[in-house]
Image: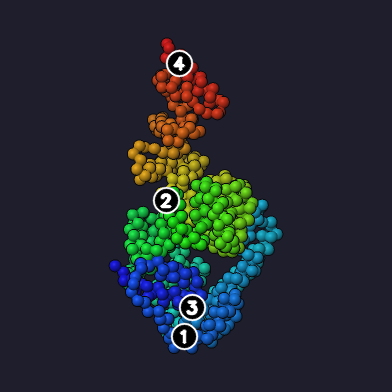
Amino acid sequence: MVETTQIRRDLYLASLTLTNLNLFHAAKWCSEALNGLVSTTEPFDFLPPPLLEDEQADQFQLLLAKNYFNCKEFLRASRALQNCRSGNGYFFKLYSLYISLDKQVSEELDGILHLNPKSVVQDGDGEDFARKSLEVSGEVKKTYVSIILDAENFMKEHGQENSFLLYLLGIIYNRKSCPQEAQKNLARSLELFPYNWSCWQELFSTFTSYNDVTEFSELIRNSSSILASSVMFQMFELVALQEFYQQQPVFEEKLTQLSTIFPKFSFLDVQKFLVAYHRLDYYLAESIFDDILLNDPMRLDDLDTYSNMLYVMEKKSKLSYLAQYASHIDKFRSETCCVIANYHSMKGEHDKSIMYYIRALTLNKNCLSAWTLMGHEFVEIKNSHAAIESYRRAVDINPKDFRAWYGLGQAYEVLDMHLYALYFYQKATNLQPTDKRMWQAIGNCFEKIDKLEEAIQSFEKALAIDNSNKLNDGSVALSAEPHICYKLAVISDKLGRQRETYKYMRLCFEQELEWGITDEISKARLWLARHALESKRFEEAYELAKEFHLTNANSVEEARAIAKEARSRMIK
C-alpha cells in the first residue's frame, strides 16, 4: 500500500510550488488530488516548501514578475527577472517570454481561426494569411531557439538541472516536432518533480501509439525505479489505457488500486466516464458524469464531451438545460461554448453552432472537441473543404483522436475521393479497432473501388465486433446490425457466392424481431421470397412475400407477383 501520509505531504508542497510558478492547471490538479485523498485524523505539518539560497535572493523579483504576469504583462514579467539566480526564477523568466510569444502569434494572425462558415477562404485572403503565417513562423522559430539555448546554458553554467526548465524545453521541442528530444526532457523533468501533471499531459502528446507508451514505461522502469514506483506513474499508466482505448480489465484493475488511495478524486471518475463513452456505453457514462456533477456542480471541465454524448443520445431537454446551466456558471469558457454549439446543432441551426465553436476556439485554440465537432457542422452544410480544414486542425492538436480521422474520411468520401477516404478511415481504425463503424466505413470504400474481397473482410470484422459486443452484454442469440448483414449479402452476390449470399440475407431477415422493419430487412425478405420461389419452396415464398413491408412501389408489385405465383403453384 502506498504511504498516503507521504503522498499528502508531497501533493501539498507540489501545489504550493506550482502555484508559486503560475502553473495553475498543474496546481489545480494537485489540489484536487490532495482533497481527494482518503481521510485521516493524523496531524499535518503546514510548513512552506524550503527555499535555497538563490531562491531566497530572487523572491522579491519573482513576486514582482508574478504580479506582472497576472496582469497579462508577460514581457515585463520576463524583464523583471533578468538578473535572477535561481533555476525556478529563470524558468519563470523564459516561461513569461514563451507565453508572450503565444499571445503575440494569436494577435498577429487575427486569432487562430481562418475559416469562413459560409465558404472557403477567398484567394486573396488566403495568400495574405499564408504570407503573414510565414513571417510569424520565422519569428517563433528564432524565439524558440533562443529559449532553448538560454535554458540549456543556464543549467550548464550552474551545473544543476531544473525540473521546470526541462519541462519548458520539452514543450518547445514538442512544438518544433522533435518528439524524442521532448520525451527525454519531459521524462527527466518528471524524475526531478513527478507531481507536475501538465508535464505528464505534454508527454502524452508526444506519443502516437500505445506501443510508444509501452516502450517509454519500460524505459522508466529500467532507468528510474523511484519514478516508476510513484503514484504519479500509476496515474500515467491509467490515463494511457484510457487515451489509447486499451483493454478494459487492466484499466479496471488500475482504477480500483488508485481509488483506494483517492476515493474522492473526480479525475478518476472522469477517466471511468471517458472509457464508457469511447466504448459507446452511453447510459453508464451518463450515470457516472451525473454523479460527478452532483459532487461538484460548478465544474465545467469535460462538459463539452458530456454534452456531445447527450447530443448523440438525442436528449434535447437535458442538453438545453445544460447549456443554460453552463452559461450561468461562465459563458466565456470554451466548454460552455461547445455545450451551446451542440444544443444549436441538435436544433438544426448549424450556422449558429459554427459561430459558437469559433468562439470556443477563440477562447482556447487547443479545444480539440471544438475543431472536430465544427468539422461535423461543415459536413452538415455541405462545405467539405472547410470540414477537411477543421478535422486537419484537430489531428494536428491530437493525432490520437479517431473521431477527427474518421471525419476526414467522411469528408473525402463525400467528394468521391475514396482512396483518400480509405487512408483516413484506416488511421481511425488503428486507433479504435473495436468500433464497428470504422470497419463499415472501410468496407464501403473498398466496395466503391471494386476491391470486393477486402470489403467482405471489413464487413465480417464489423459483424464479429457487433456479435462480441452483444455477447459481452449477456445476449446469447446471434444478432447483428441489418445493414452489415445486407452489405455482406450484396457483395457476396456480386462475387457469385450464392450460399454466402443466402446465409447473410437470412441473418439480416432474422433481425426483424429486434430491429423492427428496416429498409435492409425488407429487401432481404424480398430476396429470400424470390429465392424460395426459384427453389420451388412455394409455401415459404408465399409467407415471406405476403407480409412484405416497403414503400417502394416496384418492390411492392414484385412481392405481390411472387405471392400470387407461389399461391397458384401451391394450389396445383
Question: Who comes first in sequence, dot 4 or dot 2?
Answer: 2
* Number of the front mark, 3 or 4: 3
In the picture, measured across the screen, residue 149 lies left or right of residue 536, that is right
SS of the residue at dot 2? helix
Q: Position of residue 56 (x, y in %)?
A: 47, 87
Q: Residues within 10 Å of mark 3 (few under 14, many from 20)?
A: some
**Against 540, is 9 above or below?**
below
- Quarter of the image with the C terminus is top left
Count neighbours of disc 2 (C-alpha within 10 A) and say few if under 14, some if 14 to 19, many if 20 or more. some
For badge 4, the amino acid type reads: Arg
Mark 3, mark 1: which one is toward the viewer? Answer: 3
51 horizontally vs 70: left or right: left
| Label whose residue precedes the other's in the sequence (3 or 4) | 3
| 1 or 2: tag closer to the N-terminus | 1
Q: Mark 2 = which residue?
A: 284
- The residue at 49%/51% (across/down) is 309
The reply to whether dot 3 and dot 1 touch (C-beta < 8 Å) is no
Query: What percent of the width, then of the height, locates residue 108?
Result: 65, 69
In space, the residues marked 4 and 2 are separated at their CA atoms by: 51 Å
Which residue is drawn at the image coordinates 40% and 81% (left, top)? 47
Amino acid on which disc 1 is placed: Glu
Q: Amino acid at mark 2?
A: Leu
